[in-house]
Image (cartoon, helix red, strand yellow):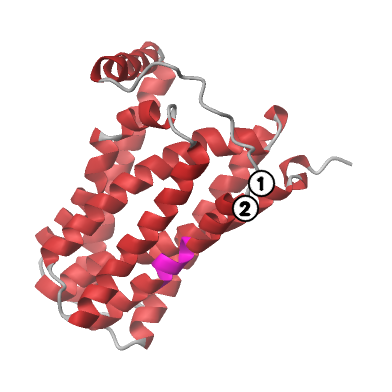
Amino acid sequence: MRRGPFRHRWFNLFVGSVGLGSIGSEVARLAMPLLVLDLTHSLGAAALLRGVQMVPYVFFGALAGALIDRVDKRRLLIACDVLSALLMATVPLSVSVGWFSLELLYAVAFLLGTVEVLWGVTADFSVLPSLVEEHELTTANAAYLGADRGARVIGPLLGGTTIAALGGGIAADAAALWIAAVAFLPTFVVFLLMPPLLEPSLVTASLTPRNVAREVGEGFSFIWRSPILRALCVLMFVSNLGGVGIQTLLLFVLSVEHGLDAAT
């Protein structure tokens, strides 16, 4: 009896570690806007934070593929996990020593967004196909996305409960980010111990502006020629943009307008 992708040890470890990392990321998506709201009581400042974190997806998303095709993917993923953990830890550390500022938080959000683009593109399009057989990819992707969606339920609950248990306020919001920092360790360990399963880069062209522009143009041209892909891209852009706005607005209304705590 075949067990599909779950018969692959490193696939199971990868999906499990991604689920834990996603929980940490969801904690951060709650704690960071709350930190801004507790500091400024401004919806605009909180919305700007989410916008700053989304900027890399818009401007660097297309460029990420060209870079990833030319580097050691395993080392890139390890570096992304280390950088993400350090960036998350920067916020509670800065609060504890009195160096925290809104500008620092915006800088951290932008850098986190950039690292997330690199990690996400590499994991989605390079790791999964290397860990399972081609006929198992559908089930593997379902498991991968399932872990991420489950984290979207668990993460906010964990983050809100933690912030409320610590008494709320700026210090509690920042302290919750330690969960996010630690949550990057499982994927770091998995990629550190993983044997050389990831396919080496087949791109030999140098990383020059002309080559990058050509490859990005080919990608956009491919999407534009497909009505389905074109519609999906527009739908995802509008959905993500609207989702970010609604989440920030809800946090503002509940925490500032109605004075509800993070656990609520």
Residue underneath mark 2: 193
Seen at 63% across and 39% down, the residue is 196
Measuring from the top left, give residue 39's x and y in whole percent: 13, 74
Q: Judging from the image, what secondary structure is the residue with disc 1 in?
A: helix
Dot 1 surroundings within 10 Å: few (below 14), some, or many (20 or more)?
many
Mark 2 surroundings: few (<14), some (14-19) or many (≥20) residues within 10 A: few
Q: On the picture, is 3 further left or further right than 164? A: right
Look at the picture and state if 154 lies above or below 243: below
Give residue 262's quadrant in the image: bottom left
Whether residue 170 is visible here, answered yes or no, is no
Q: Which residues are magenta?
A: 179-184
Residue 183 shown left or right of residue 57 in the figure: right
The residue mark sitting in front, 1 or 2, is 2
Say whether disc 1 or disc 2 marks the residue closer to the N-terminus: 1
* Percent x, y of residue 224: 34, 15
Q: Would residue 13 be found to the left or right of residue 232 on screen?
A: right
Q: Mark 1 — residue?
A: 11
| Residue 123 in view here | yes
Residue at image position (27%, 17%) is: 213
Whether residue 152 is situated above or below residue 34 in the rendered picture? above
